[in-house]
Amino acid sequence: MKILKVQTLRGPNYWSIRRPKLVVMRLDLEDLADKPSNVIPGFYEGLTEALPSLVEHFCSPGCRGGFLSRVREGTMMGHIVEHVALELQELAGMVVGFGRTRETADLGTYQVVFEYQDEQAGRYAARAAVRLCQSIIETGHYPQEELAQDLQDLRSLQAEASLGPSTETLIKEAEARGIPWVQLSARAMIQFGYGVHQKRIQATLSNRTGILAVELASDKEGTKQILREAGVPVPRGTVIGYLDELEGAIADVGGYPIVIKPLDGNHGRGITINIMSWEQAEAAYDAAKEVSREVIVERFYQGRDHRVLVINGKVVAVAERVPAHVVGDGSSTIKALIDQTNEDPLRGEGHENVLTKLEVDRTTWQLLEQQGYDLETVLPEGEIFYLRATANLSTGGIAVDRTDDMHPENIWLAQRVAKIIGLDIAGIDVVTPDISRPLREVDGVIVEVNAAPGFRMHVSPSRGIPRNVAEPVLSMLFPPGAPSRVPIIALTGTNGKTTTTRLTAHIFKQTGQVVGYTTTDGTYIGDYLVEPGDNTGPQSAQLILQDPTVEVAVLESARGGILRSGLAFTACDVGVVLNVAADHLGLGDINSIEQMAQVKGVVAETVIPGGYVVLNADDPLVAAMADRVKGQIAYFSMNPDSPLIRSHTQQGGLAAVYENGYLSILKGDWTLRIEQAVNVPLTLAGRAPFMIANALAASLAAFAQGVRIEDIREALMTFQASTEQTPGRMNLVNLGRYHALVDYAHNAHSYEALGGFVKNWPGERIGVVGGPGDRRDEDFVTLGKLSAQMFDRIIIKEDDDTRGRPRGDAASLITEGIVQVKPDARYETILDEVTAIHTALDAASLNGLVVILPESVTRAISLINARRPEEKPSPSP
Ligand code: ATP
Ligand code: ATP
Ligand code: MG
Ligand code: MG
């Protein structure tokens, strides 16, 4: 077996709409190509021994043990690798389920597709599964140690990718609300929502958290001061910078017991509490000094440690935090008790798990010493030994939910404190013997206010009720009724995507909104180019969806991106499928036009139930997509009498048709005329039928999304198929004696479409033809045949980049096609594109038409422009 390629999909894709996270592995079975599992001696036994839990895989038999019975009876290794990859991930604690395996057109090579939770872990599982199967084939076994190592690697890959408990709870809540999210590469920020409606968080800072409030909260002395002045109980204390001030400070706060802590510190670093003597005070001073230049000296308040979480002005959770500790059993040493505690699977390193492992540090040694203990001391039964003075979860503390115990006055006070500091998300540290009584009565104090408080202790307390504290955060960022998404109009098809995308964007611009759009020529926002390039994949779509100025997204979504990584969005408002024709076949394991229709259908199937799927009624493969979609259907057609359009509108459906020279919307029984084709420049005064079809699709998409007819009309009349606005798409240039037409047509379907225009040209027609080298041989022959039908004279050229084909090969295939149709055709081969174009332009006759289908549109346009009779661009007739 050999892995040829491993891809990871991240959005709706060819294999599944609902399961965007898939690994697609191209696997060459090599010598196993003709060996199903039942003819490999010992394989079934070895597999069940290595992974007995595979019995839970139902597979096609649909019952427990289903998959294993397939293995016993004989199934291909690709299929087994799929199930093993899934099971390895499951055993490592990741929830995955979906898998598919298909043989490709290359004999013995399979596409093995399976779900992942974490991308790196998924890719690892692919390789590990192949390794496991290979080992069983060769030796009958897979060593237990190997398996254990695989599972450990998978777990740590997943842990590495983890975003932290607070962020993950927020993401989970967003997902539950259908709010899209994406992790930004910068600073691991998370974006919720799209475009102009997006909101951001970083840990538990939100885009509404003010910098003044954060700075105030991290200045402990400033915080205490502003709270004290507001009448909030805070510890009595003072700030010093030198050791010789320490004695006076202790007297100031009323003597021992005291607390010494760094002025700006966090996570309990450098803090010593319950200081009872001058020696302890000196040591504590040094410890605090290591963290901060200035040091706080405070009265020590007896009590328990609480964290009160206030979000958007409301107390949403209260946790009591108990410092890291062990409880004696009368026979174990303190060290043994620590080790026992750390065996709890809930304890992990840092914030990776619900609790953090206990660690012995400087404070622990001090606390041991104070009590005359060491790690080998056997702790009496029931005695508690605290390893830390402070209760931070990150140093091994535990949390107990106390939300329902807090006294109303304390709730009022905490809410007021959050407002005074100015934090939208605040963690208030309260030390009090009894949270159910007002602080004032029991000498409780507010020790500190934290910006970006951790959610872990509230979401997964060690005891008590877990609180969904992410809910109020999301409700604050997206109050009821507030949008989180911008409308997404996604367009696909074999031909006309870029043109239709540009036109659709132009229509939406009439509404005054900022339109972000992606095309083969580049990514645009409003009137400006953001990034040139073939930007029809998910990355460019992400750029638009992440842009905070974008109000509407219009996304050309090409086959390449869908196959490579899936769509960038899980749902769109309008999905347009223009056509499906034979192009790009044989690439990316898509070999038939039906399979290609399934690729393009992904866009249609991603449309939300209330949205619209705009389908070409004249293309049977496209029209058939109506059966599989969740959205409402809107058809466009060049034929107003099409039975499909008829029955659809009779049932009240929405459509767009070309009727009596007009582009019109049909809404139930009503006809809404947009404009006459002759007034729509893109259609070359109505002479380019496929451009009318594109304009219908764009108009229908916009109308379905609520754009007014007047705006659509204005857009159609002002959108030029000029070399500037849509370079390479039916650019007709008047050169005085004759016309030149530059077009991107490079497959049979677009040649035919172009033919619809060329055939009606009154003068002599010269074609400069060719095609991209990576297409199939038969595609070139077809291009030749179509050229012979369209042109009076043909010049065959080749692309500079032959995409791996020997030079001259494509040209001779095209020639073959030409002579098959018209043995007496006038043709010649000039491989160099520039020479071919010049030759054709030189040969043009009066009122003739030179049609150029170039590799480089910009080069062709500049060659033509050089021949313009006058400087100003001439309008198309
Ligand atoms: P964190 O990052 O966990 O909030 P920190 O380093 O910012 O910790 P503080 O919150 O000021 O430090 O103190 C940590 C803990 O020490 C408090 O939660 C409290 O338990 C205890 N503590 C601090 N000051 C006092 C005090 N004056 N009296 C009693 N306990 C105190
Ligand atoms: P690409 O796959 O290169 O991105 P595209 O789908 O974006 O192509 P356009 O760039 O808009 O398509 O148009 C390319 C060519 O396809 C046009 O120049 C024209 O020849 C042809 N074409 C455009 N629209 C249609 C259509 N509706 N039907 C058939 N051919 C079309
Ligand atoms: Mg604190
Ligand atoms: Mg395009």
Image (cartoon, helix red, strand yellow):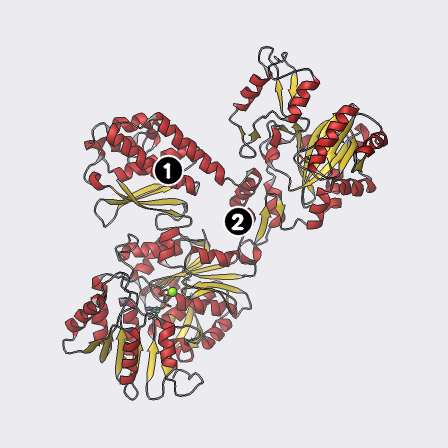
| C-alpha separation, residue under disc 1 versus residue under disc 2 | 30 Å
Q: Amino acid at mark 1?
A: Ala
Residue 298 in the image, given as x and y percentages of width and height:
79, 32
Is the N terminus in the top left, top right, bottom left or bottom right quadrant? top left
Foreground residue, 303 or 330? 330
Residue 437 in the image, given as x and y percentages of width and height:
76, 29
Q: Secondary structure at mark 2?
A: loop
Q: Secondary structure at mark 1?
A: helix
Residue at horizontal 42 percent and vertical 50 percent from the top = 11
Question: Can see residue 409?
Answer: no
Residue 817 is marked as none
Residue 670 in the image, given as x and y percentages of width and height:
43, 69
Tell me if the residue at label 2 has its CB under 8 Å from ligand 1.
no
Residue at image mark 2: 179
Mark nearer the N terminus (1 vs 2):
1
Residue at image mark 1: 125
